[in-house]
Image (cartoon, rainbow, N blue to C red):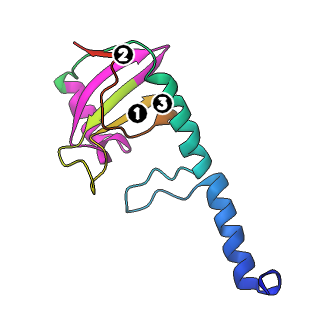
Amino acid sequence: MIGRNPFWGEQIWSFLKFLWRGSEQDEAGGLGQSFADEWRWRRKFIELKKQTICWRRATPDEQKEHDVHGVVARFGDMTYAVATLDGRKLIVRERLWNDFPDPPEFAPFVFCEDGALWCAYDFDWWPKTWQLD
């Protein structure tokens, strides 16, 4: 019986904690986000791609900054574009190796003014409402 077996109780509890709080950043390259965070970020990204955003290419200094950033540097090979929107800093990294079975081509990050990660959600196709100068 599952309810009386401490092993199953611990496994279920661990799974529920993961869904709510996520896991630590691991060597596999995750951000440590929970399942709930992932869905929140997905919803934010869907709203973000509906907005008209004027992107620009990163300067060499910005590229260097992103290449050594603790989170951003692990996702993508180069900074594809940067923008600001409502006080948030938007960064899109490009992966040279992409498409199935590899991850999607673009890895966007949106940071709040205080540096907190507001949204991160991979995508393959550049939204039509986004313009790159």
Disc 1 target residue: 109
State whether residue 53 is above or below residue 99. Answer: above
Residue 71 belongs to magenta span: yes
The answer to whether residue 112 is visible is no
Horizontal arrangement in the rendering, residue 104 relative to residue 48 (left or right): left
> Which residue is pictured at 58% across the width and 51% down the height?
35
Give the image location of residue 82, x and y in percent.
30, 22
Residue type at numbered disc 2: Thr
Which disc is residue 45 wearing?
3
Residue 46 can be seen, yes or no: yes
Please name which of the two marks, 1 or 3, marks the residue nearer to the observer.
Answer: 3
Residue displayed at 77% across by 86% down: 5
Q: CA distance from mark 3 to mark 2?
A: 13 Å
Assess whether residue 49 is covered by the magenta stretch: no
- Measured in 3D between alpha carbons, the distance from the residue under mark 1 to the one under mark 3, in whole angstroms, is 10 Å
Residue 129, label in figure: 2
Give the amino acid type for the residue marked by disc 3 in the picture: Phe
- The span shown in magenta is 61-89
From the image, which quarter does the C terminus lie in?
A: top left
Q: CA distance from mark 1 to mark 2?
A: 17 Å
Looking at the image, tell me whether mark 3 or mark 2 is earlier in sequence order.
3
Q: SS for tag 1?
A: strand
